[in-house]
Amino acid sequence: MFFPENRPRRLRRTETLRRMVRETSLSVNDFIYPLFVVPGSGVRDPVGSMPGVFHLSVDALVKEAEEVRNLGIPSILLFGIPEKKDELGSGAYGKDGIVQRAVRELKKKVSDLVVVTDVCMCEYTSHGHCGVIKDGDVDNDSTLDLLARTALSHAEAGADMVAPSDMMDGRVGAIRERLDENEFSHIPIMSYAAKYSSSFYGPFRDAAHSAPQFGDRRSYQMDPANSREAIREISLDVEEGADIIMVKPALAYLDVIRWARREFDLPLAAYNVSGEYSMIKAAAEKGWLDGNRVMMEVLTSIKRAGADIIITYFAKDAVKELEKT
Ligand code: PBG
């Protein structure tokens, strides 16, 4: 049937009609809110490159987590910035590391929030790479033990889920084995399965003080030009025991999200990363676009592409928008 019998505009005439035929809707349940914890007390320092994002000491983090919980957001993703960094990133797996301390407090005070911890070395190493350096590159196999130790120390502190973001080969299996040997077989792994070597992480590296001091991350994170490889990467993580798989970044990789959705039936997360956040915030500050509307459009597009879970610095703002409708 063609025009004039067929007129798609009939179903767009009123908001109620549009609501009836809407294919995708965002919910508060879709979001994970990332937070950055730092040493000290009473600290709430704005991150310059990410308006609305703060470095929080443990006490301030607990307050923030209460607000997140009160908005109905089910989960946070925790990143730590340690007091000191060293070659082997020992701050990542110490019992009294910044994330371990933060998790213990969170589970005491806001116990119903799902606390996911980022498992990676780059915030903790003096060189800023995601693992142990040998001959000028990150050594895969010796990094696995440090990641497994880190994940275990997070679980021991009370983390509800661990999220390895380093892109070493075999790390999901190494973490699963270490958790299972230590009576944490109930702790799920959300794997950054297809994580690209992206310039959209720029503002995050400023926030997490984790920029590599030499070279870049192209020998371990994925080449932005590849999508078949993403499917191979995700398959490996699924075989090694990932419970939730992730594509990161989101916006420039919607095709990868869509493909992953068709190929795998595990819950699929997408990380709407720092650069995706900051560019909207910056343009909105300049009055060049309507920040809230663009935010909702972008988040909807990520869900439409096939993500079940969206990790986003916009989570609180988005929930406030959803409450208006
Ligand atoms: C750590 C890590 C990064 C991000 C999450 N975990 C940075 C990186 O790989 O350099 C980026 C998150 C963001 O940009 O919002 N490996």
Image (spheres, rainbow, N blue to C red):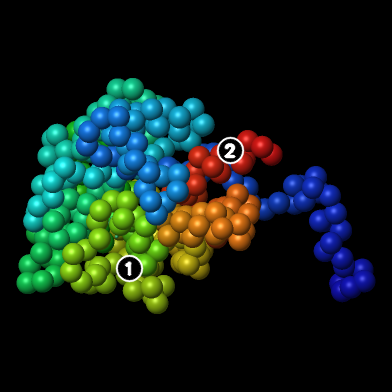
Q: Determine which of the numbered discs, if any, sits on residue 197 in the image.
A: 1
* Secondary element at tag 2: helix
Q: Out of 210 and 270, give the one closest to the viewer.
A: 210
Q: Is mark 1 on a helix, strand or loop?
A: loop
Identity, as a three-letter code, of the amino acid under mark 1:
Ser
Relative vertical location of residue 65 with respect to residue 177 in this rendering, above or below: above
**Residue 125 in the figure: left or right of residue 5:** left
In the image, residue 1 above or below residue 90: below
Q: Residues within 10 Å of mark 2 (few under 14, many from 20)?
A: few
Residue occupying the point 10% across, 71% down: 136
Q: Which residue lies furthest to the right in this view?
A: 4
Classify residue 94 as left or right of residue 225: left
Q: Is mark 1 within 8 Å of ligand 1?
A: no
Amino acid type of the residue tagged 2 in the rendering: Lys
Q: Quadrant of the C terminus?
A: top right
> Which residue is label 2 attached to?
320
* Earlier residue among tags 1 and 2: 1
